[in-house]
């Protein structure tokens, strides 16, 4: 049998282990894993590692961010950056603009994404209203349509839900078979600390971190887990930043609860001191939860190594630095409260984890694949079509050069922001080719395809099937 494309010579990280074999691809799917395969086109990947294309299940693209504030990536630049970072699928959040229903927001996002993506995409919903139409009609209809995950916030005015509201949302997830993702920070505590800081003149970017200390996140994590236990649903705690919140998750699992956990590059590489950089530079690092201390990096690594964390995502949430529609928003220099929250990272997530994890001997290649692709597919209803190199799956593959060493440079990246928080960060191991359904989308760090990405309707999460 002749394939459309054969990748030869790579060390292949499959769903069941790592092996030397050829990958035969036909009509965008993996048709054969074997040796001596024939193909109309051959990619010689000697010396490279073939990993499942990255799935980044936590990104923000074209998200409404308040009056006068604009996110730096649309679907074109955001997915281009994702592909250049070794990704083949991303899952952005869909947040309704003021006055829009969830269903209208989804339709709007679909139009914005259509024909512009260099990766496949699918949307998580953000639930910020719990009126009868949202919970009784829109959410069930959207879940049935393949939007099988949604996020609730315990912080941010206008987004935060009360405990009662969270329980109502969770009960819809239970009835309809969807995954609830929680942003766990205690809004009242933050509000109190923020007012107190401002009264004391502590208004610089660093105080974004001091007003969102570890107990704010630990308490909300505990409460979110308790609410899920009461509602009888599994849940995912996103962007866990520290050991104490992580221990809440470990304890819940010991009690037999089903809790999934996500962490991100910022929590193993950045600290609150980055928010204290000279002048307004600290604004580049303002995200929530905030980066902590280098001791917390150790705690998070322990969680990654021991399997507490299922997901390693970017939480790409890009704002330009030199821009009054971005980090330099009106009032941002007077108080950290006005600095848009979020940092870019969709293109650097995988190289950072590969370098810090695989190259430094903390992670096997199989565990890297699980944390960056397979578990995202399983948790969010895309497996086995996505997330693993196996026969029958979409031919979504990243070829990695494990010995390529170079620093992260803004000038090499493809996102819409004007900076990277990791400028100069030395990385060993980079993706050199990304393949989406058999088509090369990135070669040697540059995007090379038309926007062939499409929208993915999703099944229920594995754990609910
Ligand atoms: N939460 C996110 O998930 N992303 C960016 C900002 C935030 O608070
Ligand atoms: Zn969040
Ligand atoms: Zn996020």
Image (cartoon, helix red, strand yellow):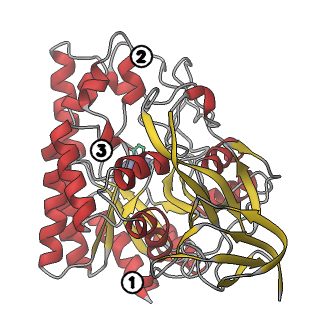
Determine which residue is flagged by label 2: 331
Mark earlier in primary sequence (3, 2): 3
Q: Which residue in the rendered view is the most extreme toward the top?
A: 279
78 displayed left or right of 200:
right
Residue 169 is situated, as x and y percent measured from the top left of the image, at 37, 70
Nearer the observer, disc 2 or disc 1?
1
Q: Earlier in the sequence, mark 3 or mark 1?
A: 3
> On screen, 82 above or below 462?
above
The label nearer to you, 3 versus 2, is 3
Q: Quadrant of the N terminus?
A: bottom right
Q: Nearer the viewer, residue 24 or 26?
A: 24
Q: Is residue 68 visible?
A: no
Say which residue appears at 26% left-offset and 33% top-offset: 271
- Within 8 Å: ligand 2 and the Cβ of disc 1? no
- The residue lying furthest to the right in this view is 40
In terms of depth relative to the viewer, which is nearer, 68 or 438?
Answer: 438
How far separated are the C-alphas under marks 3 and 1?
Answer: 28 Å
Write the residue at 16% across / 52% down: 243
Q: Secondary structure at mark 2?
A: loop
**Which residue is label 1 attached to?**
463
Label 2 or label 1, whichever comes before in sequence order: 2
- Of residues 254 and 341, the one drawn nearer to the viewer in this rendering: 254
Give the percent coordinates (x, y) of residue 360. Answer: 32, 50
Q: CA distance from mark 2 to mark 1?
A: 45 Å
Residue 95 placement, left or right of 244: right
| Mark 3: C-beta under 8 Å from nearest atom of ligand 3 | no
Q: Percent x, y for residue 218?
A: 16, 52
């Amino acid at each position: 049998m002749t394939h459309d494309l054969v990748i030869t010579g790579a060390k292949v990280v499959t769903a069941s282990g790592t092996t030397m074999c050829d990958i035969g691809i036909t009509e965008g799917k993996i048709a054969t894993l074997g040796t001596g395969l024939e193909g109309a086109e051959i990619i010689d990947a000697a010396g490279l590692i073939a990993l499942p294309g990255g799935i980044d299940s936590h990104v923000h693209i074209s998200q409404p961010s308040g009056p006068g504030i604009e996110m730096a990536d649309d679907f074109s630049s955001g997915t281009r950056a994702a592909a250049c970072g070794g990704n083949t699928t991303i899952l952005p959040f869909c947040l309704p603009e003021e006055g829009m229903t969830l269903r209208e927001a989804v339709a709007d996002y679909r139009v914005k994404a259509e024909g512009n993506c260099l990766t496949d995409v699918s949307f998580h919903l953000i639930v910020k209203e719990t009126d009868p139409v949202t919970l009784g009609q829109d959410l069930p209809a959207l879940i049935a349509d393949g939007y099988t995950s949604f996020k609730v916030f315990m912080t941010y005015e206008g987004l935060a839900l009360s405990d009662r509201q969270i329980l109502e949302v969770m009960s819809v997830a239970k009835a309809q078979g969807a995954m609830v993702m929680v942003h766990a920070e205690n809004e009242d505590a933050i509000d109190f600390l923020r007012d107190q800081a401002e009264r004391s003149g502590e208004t610089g970017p660093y105080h974004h971190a001091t007003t969102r200390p570890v107990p704010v996140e630990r308490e909300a994590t505990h409460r979110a887990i308790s609410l899920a236990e009461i509602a009888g649903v599994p849940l995912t705690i996103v962007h866990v930043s520290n050991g104490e919140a992580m221990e809440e998750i470990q304890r819940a699992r010991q009690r037999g609860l089903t809790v999934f956990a996500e962490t991100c590059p910022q929590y193993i590489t950045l600290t609150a001191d980055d928010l204290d950089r000279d002048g307004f530079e600290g604004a580049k690092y303002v995200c929530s939860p905030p980066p902590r201390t280098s001791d917390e990096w150790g705690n998070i690594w322990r969680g990654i190594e021991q399997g507490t964390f299922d997901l390693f995502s970017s939480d790409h949430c890009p704002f330009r630095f030199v821009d009054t529609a971005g980090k330099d928003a009106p009032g941002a220099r007077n108080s950290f409260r006005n600095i848009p929250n979020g940092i870019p990272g969709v293109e650097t997530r995988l190289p950072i984890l590969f370098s810090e994890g695989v190259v430094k001997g903390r992670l096997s290649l199989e565990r890297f694949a699980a944390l960056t692709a397979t578990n995202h597919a399983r948790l969010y209803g895309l497996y086995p079509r996505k997330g693993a190199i196996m026969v029958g799956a979409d031919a979504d593959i990243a070829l990695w050069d494990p010995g390529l060493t170079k620093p992260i440079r803004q000038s090499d990246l493809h996102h819409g922001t004007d900076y990277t928080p990791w400028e100069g960060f030395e990385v060993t191991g980079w993706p050199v080719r990304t393949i989406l359904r058999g088509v090369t989308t990135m070669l040697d760090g540059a995007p090379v395809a038309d926007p062939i990405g499409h929208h993915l309707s999703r099944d229920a999460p594995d754990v609910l099937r």
